[in-house]
Each structure stands twice: as structure tokens, then as C-alpha cells.
Image (cartoon, grey):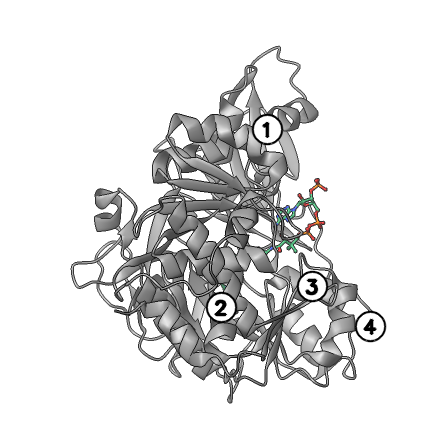
Amino acid sequence: MSNHLFDAIRHSIPAEDAVFIETGDNSTWTYGDMLQWSGRIAGAIDTLGIRPGDRVAVQVEKSPEALMLYLACIRCGAVYLPLNTAYTLAELDYFISDAEPRLVVVTPKAAEGIKAIASKYGALVETLDDHGGGSLIDLAKGEAPDFVDATRAADDLAAILYTSGTTGRSKGAMLTHDNLLSNALTLRDHWQFTAKDRLIHALPIFHTHGLFVATNVILTSGASMFLLPKFDPAEILSLMPRATAMMGVPTFYVRLLQNEGLTRDAVKTMRLFISGSAPLLADTHRAFQERTGQAILERYGMTETNMNTSNPYAGDRIAGTVGFPLPGVTVRVTHPETGVTLPADETGMIEVKGPNVFKGYWRMPEKTKAEFRDDGFFITGDLGKIDQRGYVYIVGRGKDLVISGGYNIYPKEVESEIDQLSGVVESAVIGVAHPDFGEGVTAIVVKKAGSDLSEQAILDALQNRLARYKQPKQIIFVEDLPRNTMGKVQKNVLREQYGNLYAISPNA
Ligand code: MCA
Ligand code: AMP
């Protein structure tokens, strides 16, 4: 009887009274508290009739209790399905219809809206608020703390994370217990995390970065973390003297650099700054090193694969590269059409294989098949090269994707919403260099003759349809979209034409 992921977490606990979480308002959770509360919540989920393999969808604010709910699902064998708090009801309807969760946990204020959706698909609804209260916690209080973990093997599902689809709707990436555990142990060792570390955790916990990379590395090292509800540079700088490491998206580093409090002295207890989820500009890397004396360590991953590559802990952390394949992970660069492996320094499709790579897309066997080669390599959709020394560079995307502040937006989804509006002939959504978010979602729209549709009217129409971060930062009206001889919209022409829209400053 064993629970593949949670057994490893148990074995990493340094002592029951060791600190696991400190919150911004100074409350502390020990590892003993973690065991007790994840156990009670697992008991509550079990009492509700949720069985191993059932999905539990969760859209709640970040809190220690929200992390306990994740661990409770792992312990009782449920498949954890976290959802971005920015998703609208229209977006949630799709996720719930596709994943068919037995239980949906939401904030009390969202409960009414969700109940209408959940009842269509026969799901139960419980609540969790951002102060550790709610109906799920009330149920958990009545449960014993010493829950007996469900048996889960390495290949059993631990989580489904939805990742935006290049065509049509999002796909659910199925992640197994061993996908998560193997990657956490590899990263722990590679980045030399120990029980002495204290991580600044200001990322959201509904994506791979904040949920798995940050949390599972801390749990498997027996370390502790400052769990902060959101990224606030002033708060982070005030906590830094008591911390040893931080993980963030490039926007974190851009914003920290705008703060005069970021100095060599401010970071003197910090041994590691990690960046990922989006390209870190070489300028940001350089400016950070000049200001603090520390080289940001950039790594590369995906929802489907967890982490694939990392710059070295000891050794050159080169700006503009994502480092070497992690131990146990194989990375190759292939010709996008033929699939033939390319020599060093040639640009092609990045493909990866290893225990980190997901099991497939939820209920989409054809899409799964299409994204794997016959020899088991996963086709990432990222274009890159590997140099003579083995450093991996991401040089572009073979997929039509915008990454804004570390969140992925598939243009197709935004275009479909805009194209449905009366007065619109067609639209093209592109990512344009943005000083804060890296890329800004930008819509180029062709109106019907005589239509008086305004930018504001389009934004208003998108308000309840798309999460805020997917909504265009600017909408530009044009007569026609540029097309090639095949009739395909030339987004590269648009990207070039509007490249200076958000006027990047030299140090951004
Ligand atoms: C907030 N807004 C955004 C974004 N975030 N718009 C575009 N892109 C965004 N990322 C909107 C807000 O709704 C608001 O709209 C306005 O922009 C300004 O909000 P602000 O207060 O500046 O935002 P914030 O709350 O400070 O958030 C910015 C952020 C946040 C800290 C960069 O987006 C964030 O934490 N991003 C991390 C995402 C992440 O964890 N990604 C990992 C995915 P208005 O004012 O108009 O209402 S996992 C992954 O990618 C792979 C696996 C990997 O390799 O890690
Ligand atoms: P997601 O679908 O949210 O998992 O995002 C994964 C995508 O983010 C990858 O396929 C890359 O395009 C991008 N990404 C992640 N880390 C990096 C990085 N360090 N540099 C450039 N792109 C990155």
C-alpha cells in the first residue's frame, strides 16, 4: 500500500514542528499542521463520496488551505484540477463539461454561478474562502487528522492542467504521480534545495510553476516558504533578508528592477533567483546581475512536460539560454517537417522525452498521438537550437501563442470571440513586445462597412467571455489583413508593423 507522491513528501519531512509555510500576515504552518489538515480535507473529500480517479476541480484564491486541498487530493487519490481565478463562467463551463469533476471547490462568492453549471454535469459544489473558511473546511473539521492515504502507483493520475489549444478549446494535460515526483526530486537536487531553504512564493498556484515547481520542490526538500497571495515587489523586498531563494516569471524581475530597494545588500541572504514560463530578456538578466551581483538562473518547461532544461547551479548561467537538459530528460532539435535530428547550432523543433513528460491529453487520443513521435518524444511546438557546449536556446515558437506575464494566450480563442461580434469581418490577434508583460495581447480587427463598432465596445463584449489577461491591451482597426498567396494571414507582417506599440524601454 503506497501513495507514490505523498509517500515521498512524508519521507522528506524534517520534523513535525519544522516550518512549512509562513504567510505574509505572520501565521505559520508546520509540517505537522500540513499532515493534519491535508488529512482532514482528504477525509472530507472521501466522505463526500469522491473516489480515486475522480476529478476535483478547484478555483479558489491562494492560501495555505488551498495548498492543503491540493495535497488532500493527492492523498485520497482524486485527480486535482486547478483553475485560474481569472477564468469567467463561460470558460469554466467548458472545463467542467470536459473534465466532468465529481466535486468543484470555489470561493463563496462564485458558488451561486458555479452551482448552475455544476448541476448540469452532476458535480457537487463546496466552498473555500481566502481566509481558510468555507463549507469544505467545515466538513474537514469533523474529520480525523490521521487519514489513511489511498494507494496510488507511479503511473496513476495526480492532476489535470488545462493548457490552451492551438485550435479550438483547451486540452487537459494528464500528469501522473511520477511526472510530478520525478521532476520535483530532479529540480531539488539540481538547484540544491535543502531543509535550510526558505522560498519566496509569490506565484499563482493554479499552474505548473507555482503549484509543482515551487511547492513540490519545497515539500521534497523539507524546506519552508513565504506563501504570498500575489506579487508585490515592496513586500518581497521586505521579506528577502529572511529568505534564500525566489522563483518567478520575467515580469517579477522587471518590476523588482524598477524598485530602488533592490540592492546587493537586500539580496545578501539569497542564494538563488530562478526565472521561467516566458523568455527572460538578456537585458533584464544583465541589469539584475549588475544591480545585485547575482545571475538569474533561467529554466524551461511546459504544462505537458514539467521542467525540461535548466541553466547550471554551479557554472555559467548564460543570458538568453535555458541551459542544459535536466538529468534524466533527453532534448533534441529536429527538422519540423521530416522529424530528422539536426546537428548543433541548427534551429528546429524542440522535442523532449523523460519521466517528466505527461501521459496524454484528457479524452483526446488523436491530439495526443499527433504530438508524440513514434519513438516517444513529445513535440513541444517551441523552436530552438542546442549549441556546441550543449546549452539549449529557445529562438521562437512554432505554435501561435502569446505569453503575457507568464500566462499563455492562444490567439485563436480571442479571435473566435471577436469574430462573433456583429460589425466584425475578421480579426488577427498577435503578441507585441511589452515592457512589463513581455508580450501584450493585441487585436487587429477588420470592421464591416459602415459599422461604428469601437475599441471599448469590443472590450466590453469580451468582459464576461474571456479572462482579463487574455483581453487585448490594444485593438487596432484596419481595412484588410495582410495575406500570403495561400490566403493565410501573415501575422509576422503584423508583428513587424505594430512592434513598437508598447515602446519598450532599454532596460525593461
Ligand atoms: C494581470 N493582468 C495581466 C496579467 N496579469 N494582463 C496580461 N498578462 C498578465 N499576466 C491584468 C490585470 O487583470 C489588470 O487588468 C492589469 O493587467 C494590471 O494588473 P497588475 O496588478 O499589474 O497585475 P498583477 O496582479 O501584478 O499580475 C501580474 C503578474 C501575474 C504578477 C505578472 O500575471 C502573475 O503572477 N503571473 C505569473 C503567471 C504564472 O505563474 N505563469 C506560470 C504558468 P485591469 O487593471 O485592466 O483590470 S506555468 C508555465 O508557464 C510553464 C509550465 C513554466 O515553464 O513555468
Ligand atoms: P505552458 O503551456 O503554460 O506550460 O507554457 C509553456 C510554454 O512557455 C513553453 O512551450 C514555452 O513556449 C514557454 N516557456 C517556458 N519557459 C520558458 C523560458 N524560460 N523561455 C522561453 N519560453 C519559455
Which residue position holds label 2?
35
Residue 39 on image: x %, y %? 46, 61
The first of marks 1 and 4 along the sequence is 4
Residue drawn 48% across the image and 35% down it? 92
Q: Which residue is mark 3?
A: 254
Residue occupied by mark 1: 464
Determine the CA span between mark 1 and mark 2: 39 Å
Residue 396 visible: no
Residue neighbourhood size for the residue with mark 4, other residues' Cα within 10 Å, grouped as few (<14), some (14–19), many (≥20): some
Q: Are marks 4 and 2 in contact (CB under 8 Å)?
A: no
Q: In the depicted view, which residue is nearer to us: 396 or 373?
A: 373
Three-letter amino acid code at disc 1? Asn
Query: Relative to 290, is 15 on the left or the right?
Result: left
Q: Earlier in the sequence, mark 4 or mark 3?
A: 3
Circle nearer the viewer, 1 or 4: 1
Asked if marks 1 and 4 touch (Cβ < 8 Å), the reply is no
Element under label 4? loop
Location of mark 4 (residue): 261
